C-alpha cells in the first residue's frame, strides 16, 4: 500500500520542480506567453516542447510493454471523438488560464509559494469541477 | 542564455523544466500505467470523478507538486512570483474548473500527455485553449485590465 504511493509522490515532486524551473508557477510568465500580439515571451513553448519530446519517447516505450513496471495494467484514455464539450470546455479553460495565469498543476504547486492565493484559486476550481459534473459524459 | 529578440525569455530553464515534467509524466505512464493529467488526478483525489487510480495515489501525486516547487524555490532562492487578487483568482478558478472538466483535460493531460501521442482530441483541445488564452490576454490589454501587480 505504502509502496504504491512512492511512484505518484515522486512523479508529483519532479512534476512540481519542473513546473517551477520552467516558469509555469509564475503567473507573469504565463501571461507573457499568452501575450502573443503584445510583448510575447516564448519560454513556455520550450517547457511544452521539452515535456512533449520526453513523453513521445515514453509512449514509444509504452507500446512495447505488456504492463506497467509497478502496476497491474495500463489504464489510459482511448477516446478519439471531437465533441462540443471538448471544444467549449477547452475554450473556457483558456479564458480562465489567461485571467490569473494559473492552470491546475501550477495551482497546486503554488501552495508552496503563496498558500492563500493558491487555496482561493483551487477552491474555485474544485467548485467549477463540481458544477461541470452534470454536463459531462454526454459526448 | 537568452533568445535573440526575446530578452525576457528563459529558453534553457524552460526546456529543463519541460524535460523534468516529461520525465515525471513518463514515470506515471511506465511505472503506474496512468496519465499524469493533473485535472483528472485532482478530480479523483477530491471525489469529483471516479477513475481506476486509487485515491491515495492521486493525493500522493498532488502532495508532490508543492513539495517539488518548495525544493526548487529553496535551492534557487528566486523571489516569490506575484499572484492575482481574490476576485480574478475566483473567476479564473471557476472557469478553469468548469472548462477542464467539460474539456476532459488541462495543460498536462491534453498538452503533455495527449499531444505527445498525437491524440486528435488533445490537439484540438490545446489549439482551442491556446487560441482563447491569446484572445483573452489581447482583450484584457485592449481594455486596460491589469490583474497581476
Image (tube, coloured by chain):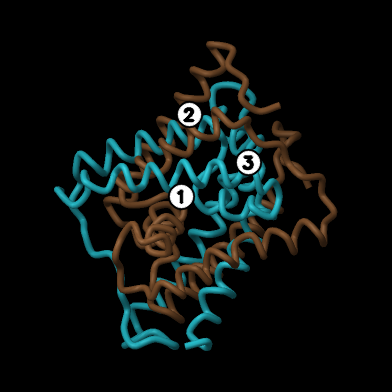
Chain colours: A cyan, B brown
| Outermost residue, right side | B77
Q: Whole-percent x and y of residue B113?
A: 41, 61
Q: Position of residue A131 (x, y in %)?
A: 31, 42
User: x, y (%) of residue A108?
Assistant: 57, 54
Residue A93 versus residue B118 in the image, above or below: above
Q: Quadrant of residue B141?
A: top right
Q: Nearer the viewer, residue A8 or B50?
A: B50
Dot 3 falls on which chain? A
Describe the element under mark 2 as helix, strand or loop: helix
Residue B126: image quadrant is top left
Mark 1 on the same chain as mark 3: no
Q: Would you say B128 lies left or right of B80 here?
A: left
Q: Is B73 drawn above or below residue B58 in the view shown?
A: above
**Structural distance between the alpha carbons of marks 1 and 2:** 15 Å
Residue A75 higher or lower than A41, as above or below: below
How far apart in space, not on screen, are marks 3 and 2 (Cα)?
Answer: 23 Å
Of the two numbered discs 1 and 3 in the rendering, the one whose residue sits closer to the viewer: 3
User: Callout 3: helix, strand or loop?
Assistant: helix
Mark 3 or mark 2, whichever is nearer to me: 3
Which mark, by number, is residue A117? 3
Look at 52% across and 79% down and name the residue there. Answer: A7
* Mark 2 chain: B
Chain holding disc 1? B
Q: Residues within 10 Å of mark 3 (few under 14, many from 20)?
A: some
Identify the residue at horizontal 53%, vertical 52% (top origin): A48
Which disc, if any, is residue B107?
Answer: 1
Rounded to the nearest angstrom, the CA distance separating label 1 from label 3 is: 20 Å
Residue position marked by numbered label 2 in the rendering: B134
Residue at position x 27%, y 52% in the image:
B120
Closer to the camera, A39 or B61?
B61
Q: Residue furthest top?
A: B143
Residue A118: x and y in percent read 60, 46
Amino acid at each position: 500500500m505504502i509502496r504504491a504511493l512512492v511512484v505518484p509522490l515522486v512523479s508529483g515532486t519532479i512534476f512540481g520542480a519542473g513546473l517551477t524551473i520552467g516558469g509555469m508557477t509564475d503567473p507573469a510568465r504565463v501571461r507573457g506567453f499568452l501575450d502573443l500580439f503584445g510583448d510575447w515571451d516564448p519560454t513556455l513553448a520550450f517547457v511544452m516542447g521539452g515535456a512533449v519530446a520526453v513523453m513521445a519517447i515514453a509512449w514509444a516505450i509504452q507500446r512495447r510493454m505488456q504492463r506497467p513496471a509497478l502496476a497491474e495494467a495500463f489504464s489510459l484514455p482511448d477516446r478519439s471523438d471531437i465533441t462540443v464539450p471538448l471544444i467549449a470546455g477547452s475554450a473556457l479553460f483558456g479564458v480562465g488560464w489567461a485571467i490569473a495565469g494559473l492552470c491546475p498543476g501550477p495551482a497546486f504547486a503554488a501552495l508552496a509559494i503563496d498558500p492563500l492565493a493558491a487555496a482561493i484559486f483551487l477552491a474555485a476550481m474544485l467548485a467549477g469541477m463540481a458544477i461541470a459534473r452534470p454536463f459531462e459524459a454526454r459526448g | 542564455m537568452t533568445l535573440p529578440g526575446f530578452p525576457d525569455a528563459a529558453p534553457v530553464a524552460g526546456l529543463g523544466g519541460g524535460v523534468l515534467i516529461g520525465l515525471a509524466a513518463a514515470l506515471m505512464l511506465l511505472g503506474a500505467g496512468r496519465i499524469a493529467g493533473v485535472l483528472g488526478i485532482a478530480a479523483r483525489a477530491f471525489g469529483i470523478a471516479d477513475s481506476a487510480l486509487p485515491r491515495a495515489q492521486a493525493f500522493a501525486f498532488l502532495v508532490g507538486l508543492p513539495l517539488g516547487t518548495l525544493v526548487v524555490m529553496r535551492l534557487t532562492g528566486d523571489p516569490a512570483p506575484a499572484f492575482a487578487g481574490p476576485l480574478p483568482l475566483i473567476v479564473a478558478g471557476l472557469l478553469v474548473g468548469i472548462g477542464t472538466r467539460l474539456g476532459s483535460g488541462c495543460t498536462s493531460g491534453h498538452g503533455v500527455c495527449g499531444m505527445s501521442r498525437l491524440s486528435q482530441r488533445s490537439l484540438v483541445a490545446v489549439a482551442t485553449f491556446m487560441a482563447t488564452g491569446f484572445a483573452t490576454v489581447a482583450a484584457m490589454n485592449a481594455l486596460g485590465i491589469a490583474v497581476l501587480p
